[in-house]
Image (spheres, rainbow, N blue to C red):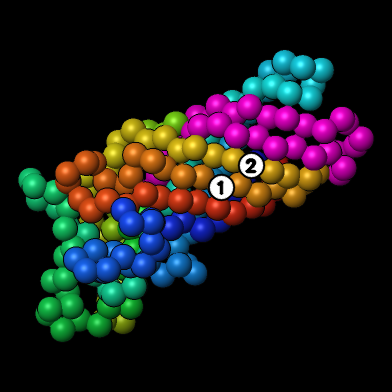
Amino acid sequence: GMQLGFSWLLSSQGSLYPMGAEDAYRLKLGSSISFAINPFQYSISIVDRRFGVVTGIGFNFNFYRFQGGTTLGMNRDGVFVDSTLLQGGAKVASSKLRTGYFTVPLLLELQSPRRGYWKRFYIAAGVIGGVKMYATTKVRYNGNRELYHSNAFFINDVQFATTVRIGLGPMHLYANYYPMGLFEQGRGPTFYPIEFGMLLFSF
């Protein structure tokens, strides 16, 4: 189905509020979101349709919105905070990093005995593999002026997340954690993406 939630970054100290040189990467937590769509699912029952394996194909999109109005730049050494607009006196209204991944989940799922769709309880855990489709930045400044950059930004091309999901009937909550980090090792600050939210609707 379709999922909507928050998309945040944990620092290497496990904080949502990075300090020092990493402070420029601080996010607007209330508007940094994740959107996922999983159009194809395949389930394999192992034990009496109560325990099995779930896989499929999907897409995951993240929108990281920065607080300070800075954006990302990159050179041969790695990614850096680009504050050119601010230094030039521009009034930055919003700055965000957008990423998109093609995803394949592999989950183990346990369901309660079938008592109708609305009463069925289920819990699942596993991993989600992903291949990066794009990474772009967008800055809106001085009214309606916009600046776009589409680069690799040394964001990991291949990614995976550990995930847990729990639900009752159509109500479904999820949480994902990415232990590889957002950027390639040594090419950017250490941040670990986390996502959590709910199922909007199922197909």
Determine the image quadrant of residue 98: bottom left
Determine the image quadrant of residue 144: bottom left
The crowding category of the residue bearing disc 2, from other C-alpha atoms within 10 Å (few below 14, some 14 to 19, many at least 20), is many
Q: How many numbered marks does the figure carry?
A: 2
- What label does residue 175 carry, if any? 1
Mark 1, secondary structure of its residue: strand
Is residue 48 rendered to the left or right of residue 186?
right
Residue reaching furthest to the right: 115
Look at the numbered discs 2 and 1 and tell me whether their residues touch, using CB distance below 8 Å.
yes
Determine the image quadrant of residue 155: top left
Q: Residue at x 20, y 50 (%)?
A: 188
On screen, residue 157 above or below 72: above
- Magenta extent: 99-128
Residue reaching furthest to the left: 76
Residue 150 visible from this viewpoint: no
Give the residue at mark 2: 165
The crowding category of the residue bearing disc 1, from other C-alpha atoms within 10 Å (few below 14, some 14 to 19, many at least 20), is some
Q: Please provide percent x and percent y for residue 84.
A: 13, 71
Q: Please provide percent x and percent y for residue 164.
A: 59, 40
Q: Please provide percent x and percent y for residue 12.
A: 31, 53
- What label does residue 38 carry, if any? none
On screen, residue 23 above or below 59: below
Residue type pointed to by label 1: Ala
Residue type pointed to by label 2: Arg
Q: Please provide percent x and percent y for residue 30.
A: 49, 69
Cα separation between marks 2 and 1: 7 Å
Q: Residue at x 51, y 32 (%)?
A: 127
